[in-house]
Every structure is written in structure tokens, then in C-alpha cells.
Amino acid sequence: MSVALEKKNSKWIYAFAAIILTAIAFFPSLSNGFTNWDDEVYLLNNENIREFSWEKIKYWFGAYHHGNYHPLTMISYMWEYSMSELNPRVYHFNNYILHLLNTGLVFFFVYKLVDKKEVALIVATLFGIHPMHVESVAWVSERKDLLYTAFYLGSLIVYLGYKHHPDWKKYLLLIFLFVASLLSKSAAVVLPVVLLLIDYYQERKLTIKLVIEKVPFFLLSIIFGILAIKSQNATEAIASYDTFTTTQRALFAGYGSLVYIAKVFWPFGLTAFHPYPALVENGTRLPYLFYIVPALSIVVFGGALFLWKKSKGLVFGLFFYLVNVALVLQFVSVGSAIYAERYSYMAYVGLFFMIAMGLSKIIEKQKKFRKPIYIVMITISIGLSFLTFQQTTTWKNSVSLWKQYNTTHPESRHGEYKIAEYYMDLGNNELALEQFLYIGQKYDSTGRAYMGAGNILGRMGKAKEALVYFNLAEKEYDPNGNMQSLWVNRAITFSMLKQYENAFEDYTKALEHMPNDYQIYTNRGFAYLEHGDLDKAINDFSTVLQVESNNIRLYFMRALAQHRKKNMNLAIADYSKVLQLNPNHKDAYHNRAICFEAQGNYKQALDGILKAQQLGKQENPAYIERLQKLAKN
């Protein structure tokens, strides 16, 4: 075997070793289910992934979803749904395969960058097995991380080939992969800066040609950056700038930048959500930790700049990390987490590169350290794999996920509520009620817990008991506690108890808090209809139909109200609209027939009743016989 062939084969063996270890570490994810942490938004309740067609593909290229623009990610969900509907194994398997692919791509990117198999092996292995990457892999809703990274790494590998042997085919492939990465997640906008970092590391001279070469990439970054801001603003995911001071935002950025580095070496306290700290001293300042850690980050990054000329590998790795993590350091507050494990996914390649290059230099200078370093790295890899294996199991379902959160953040009740919501979604009213009452006993100011208990009791048909808890919730109302639906829920309960005046009063309060929630008008319209306030019911149904012009149910209910008012022409018009939207609506045929009969249009009445019967409605034979006689006259 030639030396070149042996070298080629050995690099594949190294890459395969990293992939195999990663496959073992993440194996439990294949048995995981969905969670109530965005999976319902992306998959379980998302009607727009349930049809794999050109129309839906075009829809996703023109739509924001949950504060993001990532059409390729959503199309991947459409494809999976077309194969398996909502079988979680399929979605987890594809996440698993994508992560293994990314581990291999990391190996070949680093290998092409430095031509050192050992360095590439260390970086790829750490990338593949690190516990901080569990969130990106074991969480179905984080598909965007895996998909954009695959195209992103592909872009870097193609660029390294293009840089040494430029041609237009490689350049076009590079742009194609970059666009695919941008269409998977907007975090890819930083890739042009990483390309410049590669130029710096490999000492490519700054020329006009190099600048022109990068222009299309920066233009694409600007375009997709604007799209990202618009998508975040569409769901108000970006907090108002007044939420935190400029100083506090700078402290968050400094804190986050060092926390991610610390978690490389101490990957504990992991969980799905890391909330912002509560302000202390009557809301005047952050806890002292948020002043100390950013100060340490200045020392760390200042030291790196000091070593600018002494260690190019250190500078490249550190800036690779900073460039890829910069947009999520919460200087601009996006979401409600101060940092998130998923944000480390691509950025950690830079930190692992620094570690690997540092170990490589030690071995080059002191050969005697080779064996001890290998033993230490193997031991660390086994330890990290074990932690990852364990952490992957915490994403098995919503209860295991949020129990870990409760352990990590015992001062927060967010996880407790998510567990209660999980039981609610599961239809297990007893466990949901038990969880809400537990929260009410454990914490102070638990209006939301009492509201939840009221909701469950109402669902169980225990309206009087529900009302007791809704009244308790009102006494502890928290405007920032997701309690805006309190008055709607209590109004529904009053309606169940036939206390309509109280219900109407609560619906009015609900509209003061949520003026654009048209479901409130719908619910109040039903209550007016039950109470006999037909004009008010018609007004509420009409208000909703102005914005929901294809709402079959509301046309039917408005027709029913007009029918009871003996406004037969208006009732017939609404029943006809129902049948226009749904030609198989048997009740609309039946009711419209009765309206026709009241007007003396017996032939049309008979046709309607026969059509309703044909569609499966049980009609009275005597009534049909009577209409047949009347229709003949």
C-alpha cells in the first residue's frame, strides 16, 4: 500500500471513530418522544406540514414561523410527516443522522484546514459527544441547528478546496450551500466573516479579487439578516430595548461569552431553559455574579489578543467561536433565556480547535507527553459520552425534561407549569389538577396555578368548584404571569352555571386585556345565543366573520340566531354560505329547508330535507310526506 493511500484510508478511519463514539453517546435519543417545548408549534399542532406539495413548499418560502424564517427546516418536517405522520422515531432518527453527518464534516473541515488527522479527530470527537450539544440533537424542534450546520460546514469545506484551486463551479457550489444554510437557520449569516478568518489563518493576501469574491456573501448575509429581524419582530421575540439597560445588556453578553467557554470544561447544570436573573435591591441591579464574570471575560479575550502573533491557531479558534456565538449573546434580547445550550453547536468548533491545536503543539515539542495526552483524551471522551448519554434521556418526554429544569432552577416555577400543561394536553385531568394544586401550595403568588386548577375542574364538569379557584386566581392576578385568559375561562364557567350576566361582565374584562382575541367574541356570541340575546349574538359573530370570512361554524351559528329572530332571508343567506363552503353540511340543508317552508317555498324545502337525509341525517318520514303534498299544490 502506498503512503498516500495509507494516509487517505487512515483519515477515514479517524473520522469513522469519531462518528461511532458519537452514535453510541446519542443512541438514547432514538427512543425519545415529543415534548411540549415548541414541538407542538413546529409539529403537533402545525397544519402547514401535513401536506407535501408544491403549494406548501411555496408557502414556507414566503412565511415566518414562530419568530424564524427557515423554509428548508419546515420542508424537512413536511417530508417526514408525509412518510410517518407524527411518529417521533422518524424525526429523532433524522436528527441523529444529521448530527453524525455534522461530526464527520467537522473532521474533514479541520483536516483540510490544518492537515493533521489527530487535531481533526479531537475536534470532531468533542463536537460529536459534548453534552452541550444534546439540546440540538435530542430536541426535534431544533432541527434547524443541525440542518444549517450541515450546509455551513459543507460551505467551509468547499471554500478550502476553492481557495487552493479556484474555479467557477466550486464558487457556485459554495454560494448554493451558503444559501441552503441561510434557508435552514439565519445564524448562518456570519459565514462570510468565517471565510475571512480562514483567509487570515492560511495567510491569504488581501487583494481586490478577494474582496470582490466575498461581496455576494455579505450581500446575502444582509438580506437574510433583515429577514431574521422581521421574523423576530413578527412574533415580538425581540424584547423592547427598555426591558434592560445598555449596561445590563453588555453584562449579559460578557457573562454569556464566558459561560459557554466554562461549560466546555464543566458541562453540568444543563437544562432546556436558562432564564434571565431577577434584579435585586428593588430591581436596581443584577446579582454580583453578573459583574464578576464579564470582567473575567475581558481578561480572557484580552489575553487572546496579546497572543495574536504568537499563536495563530489560538486566535483563529477563539474568533471562530466569537463570530458564531456573537449574535446570541443577548446584547439584543431575543427570547427569554440568558443563554441556551443549542447556541454552542457551531461555535464550539472554534473552542475545540484551540484545545486540539494546543495539545498538538505540546506533543510536537515534548514527544514524551503523547501517550499521557492520548490516555487523558480517551478518558475525557468516555466521561463526556457518559454525560451525553444521560442528558439525552432527559429529553425522553415533557415530564423528564421539566423535572431536570426544576432541579437546575428550583427558584423558578416555569418547569412546574410545563409539567401541568403536559398532563392537560395528555387529557389526564387528575394529574394536571394535582400538579396545579401542588404549585399553589409550594409557591407564593400563585394566581396562575389557581387559574389552571379552575380550568381543569371546568373541563371535568365541576363548574362550582372551578369558580372557587377562578375567584382565588383573580385575587392574585399577575399581569406578567400569563393570566390574561382568566376572565374568558371564568366567563365560560359562569355560562355553564347559567349565570349569564356575570359571564358577560367577564367577557368585557377579557376584551380589555386581549382586544384582538376574536375567540372571545365567538365565545360571548354563543353565550348571548344561549341567553336569548340574539342581536348581540349576531353582532359578535359578524365581528369575527369580518376577519375569518371562511368560518363555517360562525356562519351556521349566525344563521341560527337569524332563524330564531324569524329573519328567514338572512338565515337562508348564511345557511347557503355554509353550504358553499361545505356542500356536505347536512344540518345546514335541514335548517335552510325549515326556513324555506316558513316562506312557503315547499319545493326547495323538500329538496333540502331529502338532501340532508341523503347525507345521513335522520329525517321524520311524516314531515317528508307532508312537504311532498305541499310541494304538489
Image: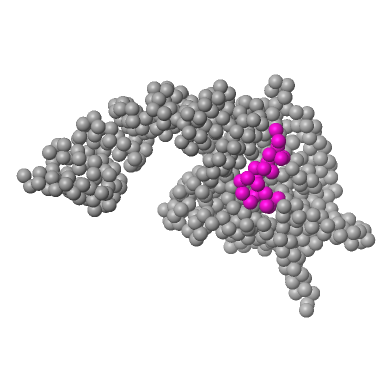
Residue 135 part of the magenta segment: no
Q: Is residue 509 left or right of residue 437?
A: left
- Considering the image in quadrants, where does the N terminus appear? bottom right
Visible in this render: residue 179?
Answer: no
Question: Residue 241, position in %: x, y?
Answer: 61, 29
The answer to whether 63 appears left or right of 334 in the picture is left
Judging depth in this view, the residue of 117 and 159 nearest the camera is: 117
Pick the front one: 485 or 165: 485
Q: Position of residue 107 (x, y in %)?
A: 72, 60
Residue span colored magenta:
391-411
- Please name whichever residue, 89 or 345, is drawn nearer the observer in this view of the structure: 89
Q: As displayed, is residue 490 above or below residue 5?
A: above
Question: Given the current orientation, which residue lies at the most extreme top position?
Answer: 282
Q: Quadrant of residue 414?
A: top right
Q: Is residue 401 magenta?
A: yes
Tell me, yes or no, if residue 443 can be seen here.
Answer: yes
- Residue found at x 13% / y 43%: 602
Percent of width and height locating residue 372: 90, 59
